[in-house]
Image (cartoon, rainbow, N blue to C red):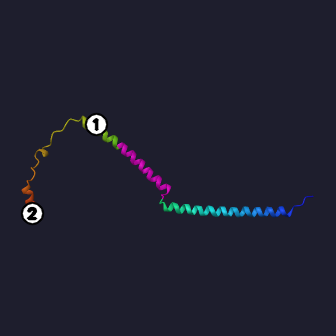
Amino acid sequence: MQTRSPIFDDLAQLLTSAAGAAKGVREEMETLVRVQVEKAADRLDLVPREDFEAVRAMAVKASDRVEALEVEVASLKKELKGAPPRKASAKKAARPKAKTKAKRKSSRKTTR
């Protein structure tokens, strides 16, 4: 017949209590660390992941649009190089002459 030793019972109870206390300390430390990390993140003014992804998608879309426009501009430039030169329009030929210094000074006096 086997009997249990009270020393082993006390030792097992002590170890169980210590393990429970260690678990409680661990949970407390995790909570404290989590709170500190959240505070640090708030001070850094970080953005939520969803906002970052939305802005990133907009930037990719804008970049794609810029590339398409660059191709279009290059195509239009190529067309202009191959086009025959245009004659000066009648409006440019009949442009009024520039005012002389004396006329500019007299017009300033009357407008003031």
- The disc, 2 or 1, on the residue closer to the chain's N-terminal end is 1
What x and y, as percent, mark residue 62? 39, 48
Q: Residue beneath label 1, please?
A: 78
Query: How many marks on residues?
Result: 2
What x and y, as percent, mark residue 47? 48, 58
Circle 1 packing at 10 Å, graded few (<14), some (14-19), many (20+), is: few
User: Is residue 89 in the magenta section?
Assistant: no
Q: Is residue 86 above or below residue 5?
A: above
Residue for point 31% across, 39% down: 74
Residue for point 9% across, 57% down: 104
User: Is residue 48 in the magenta section?
Assistant: yes
- Residue projecting furthest to the right: 1
Q: Image quadrant for the C terminus?
A: bottom left
Q: Is residue 105 above or below residue 70?
A: below
Q: Which residue is at the front of the view, 46 or 79?
A: 46
Q: Residue beneath label 2, please?
A: 109
Residue 40 is left or right of residue 8, and the answer is left
* Amino acid beneath label 2: Lys
Cα distance between the residues tagged 2 and 1: 51 Å
Q: Which residues are magenta?
A: 46-68
